[in-house]
Image: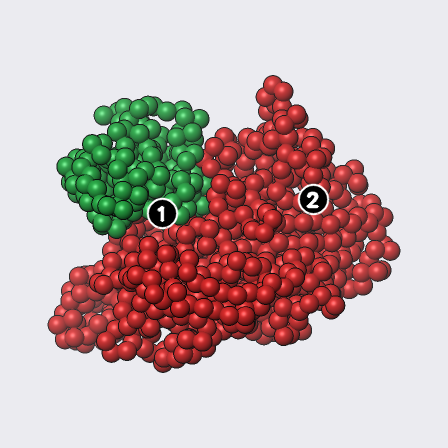
Amino acid sequence: MKPIEVIFTLNGKDTRVSSDPNRTLLEVLRNDLGLTGTKDACGGEGECGACTVILNGKPVNSCLLFIGQVMGQNITTIEGLSEKGDYHPIQKAFVEAGAVQCGYCTPGAVLASKALLDNNPRPSDQEISDGLSGNLCRCTGYKKMMDAIHLAAERHSND
Amino acid sequence: MTEILKTIGKAEIRKDAWQKAAGKALYTADIPANNLKHGVVFRSPHHYARILEVDTADALKMPGVLQILTAEDIPGDKIFGPLVPDQPSLAQEVVRHLGEPVVLIIAESRKEALAAREKIQVTFEPLTPVFDPVLAAKPDTPQLHEDGNVITELNVQDGDIERGFEEADIVLEEVYHLPRISPGYMEPETSLAVWEQDNSITVWVSSQHPFTDQGFIAAALDLPVSSVRVKSSVIGGAFGGKEDSSLSILAALGAQAVKGAVKLVNNRRESFLAHPKRHPAQIKYKLGAKKDGSFTSLKVEAYLDTGAYSSYGPAVGMIFTETLTGSYKIPNVQVDTYVVYTNSPISGAMRGFGSPQSHFAVESMVDLMAEELEMDPIRLREKNILHPGDKIFTGVIINETANSLPICLKNVREIIQRFQAIKPSPGKKAGVGFALASQSMGLGANVPDDSTHRLEWAPDGRILIHLGSPDLGQGLATAAEQITAESLGIPFDQVVTLELDTLDSPNGNVTCASRMTYMAGNALIDASEKLIQQLLIHSSRILDVPVKNLLYKNGQVIKPDGSKVPAVEFVSRLAEESIVLCSESTFSFPYPEDTTPQHLPIGMPHVLFCFGAQVARVEIDPELGTVDVTHFAAIHDVGKVISQAGVEGQIEGGVATGLGYALYETMLQKGDRWVDSFTEYLLPTAKDLPHHYENIILEVPEASGPYGAKGIGEITLVPTAPAIANAVYDAVGVRVTKLPITPERILGFAD
């Protein structure tokens, strides 16, 4: 297929890529743009959440988005959270709460958590488990991830 | 006198967490390489078939295709296997399971390799597969391997079971069925191999033992081991499933063929078919007890389905067998375990290694026995638990660590009372259940079980750990750093673990068997002492003071006048003389000859055990049959907490995996295929975990452990499924003998 030009905002920067239109955002991020923080754990079937990015404030599986669909949109990947060298409060909370083990699901879970907290600064347990339910993790049992989200929420409200 | 520990037991922040949370940690699939080529595998579309012809001509003409390899093209060994060499890297003549690799395609891009795979033409003659291990074990069933379908038969007995059953007032028998489940690590298998101009090769792996990969790669490529360098990347979980090599051999063969860099990545569907699962088991379990509750006799006949190739099946059969008496003293025991080849995907190592299967039978049966005896299930267990000095049926004498069992039960009693007081939600039926668990540590007697690690004092004062076994994500490196920091009396943040590289790292052996903190910890304590000795010897020379007059404490050398010199001053000075302070130590798992029974097959018995218990409260919708685990408590003895966050993480993650085993996970056969995606194979999500959760961590020291620590990696998922099953019975009166506990099974619509 003929390549298309896609212009979108990636981690706050205007970004232009030329790509076969039937490729996914995940493929373009990892292979063309070298942003390997976005992971693939289910083979591009939208089952695991490891490839979560934030699209206009909402968490989405980048393996289910064709690159053409992000034309003109605003995308945040895990690399966009700590770009200025400082870690985002949610990243800090994940690290400090012990929510990171193998780390493969962590970028996706951090972004899902960010999207959750941006929309709901003091979520309940139920709202947190709903917010994380699209992100599979085999290491942690999710408990410390939930602790991390509470920690980030508390710190934010104390600021 | 107890010394106050500085870092041991603290919830230190693991150092790799920052990179991981920032998305900067490089897993194998993330590692860049110049002029990278891509490999894909053509896998068998049949469960069992003869290969009549492999025609790659059309595929070779496809754009971008560089090389197409079949078994014939492998220059060296065509077969590998961790215990028994029976697994072809690429199938020859016959395929024995769906998804078995047959052809390797290397192309400029993954897309082109995938397109070429469509053009591979293999002519198969389908054969009749066998999936039932009991049927496969019969001599008149077609045999999948030359030596027959029963790869391991273990017959272990102690006492006289017939007399034991005669002495019993109640004898119960039940058959338990356990499903095939996936390790379910998030990072699928992957490998990157780079052929170097000097005809050597560097291979990045996501593996529990890169040294095993090194040996297999060298053998397959017909290279000396010294020409194969294997590097560990950040590992995205393993849980036993990455003890086996697979893609590393194929990536290396591809790189050798194209004389360049080749990457292979399994997608999830390939991963489900390619990598070892937990053994499905069928367990006929017969237990006798007297009216007073004391167990008299146990007879077990069990079949474990190891699939098409043996993987770690024979060893899994051993721990399965040894844990069939659970945490109990039973005077008369006979166990017959058969590990059997079938045409199913491979079963092998997975967290728990046979113990989750055995414990579902043991702990379900003990609850059933309590009911028949009209006895409190805690009381029945108190009556039969192991105590230090008790001899189990393998001849092993249980050590002081069994002192944790009564403490576990005491906690269980208190928690059950609390959980029972909670009122059910409207329309729901509530129940509470629990289970005990035991898990062995170590690889087993008469198997080489040595672990070597090295310390280096860097000129900037930091301590570098050349850890000989990879951290799989569970936090081994953090535990190693805390033990080293404590032993040297220096701050935790001054200790750094290096990634494993076979060129430079010592061989710490495979990260598995609930023993890595124990093995590496002991080696690093010894290495720390050696490092201090070296420092003092060099300090003595530099200061011109007899070594016996110097002391070392907390990163400082203390001179006879009491003045202190920071160790870094000596280390940096030595660096100027090109002297590097280094120490290496090997710890061998202790199997004392005089106390280790020698009458069993090689690899048996295991001599050290950990114990724990878990309590579950469930709510069941009586119309839908759905189970909600509302409250959960996990009680585990770790000997000594090294890393608080690490221990909690191991327990919480283990419970989640155990909950999946109990309620959701099963890799079913559906028509001609196996369930091979997370849409049909249900891993627990954040919504499935208990709303109320508590950890109770016990510290009953293991005398041989570093600072008293024992293993925690595997036992955390062992009691989960029987605890939930016992809670389900308490709630609705249904004894489920087959996992997972589906709504259909609760409602009686499925057996």
The disc placed on residue A40 is 1
Q: Where is B224 relative to B21, above or below?
A: below
From the image, which quarter does the C terminus of chain B lie in?
top right
From the viewer's perspective, is A116 left or right of B403?
left
Please name the amino acid that badge 1 sits on.
Asp
From the viewer's perspective, is B509 left or right of B295?
left
**Looking at this rendering, what residue extends furthest in the right direction?**
B166
The colour of chain A is green
**Residue at 74% of width from left, 54% of height from top?**
B284
Q: Position of residue B481 (x, y in %)?
A: 33, 56
Q: Is residue B470 visible?
A: no
Mark 1: give few (<14), some (14-19) or many (20+) Cα within 10 Å: many
Q: Position of residue B319 (x, y in %)?
A: 60, 61
Q: Nearer the viewer, residue B700 or B320?
A: B320
- Chain of the residue that carries numbered disc 2 in the rendered image: B
Question: Which residue position is annotated with label 2?
Answer: B737
Please name the amino acid that badge 2 sits on.
Thr
**Residue at 33% of width from left, 73% of height from top?**
B257
Secondary element at tag 1: loop
Q: Quadrant of residue A71?
A: top left
Q: Position of residue B230 (x, y in %)?
A: 34, 68
Q: Which chain is red?
A: B
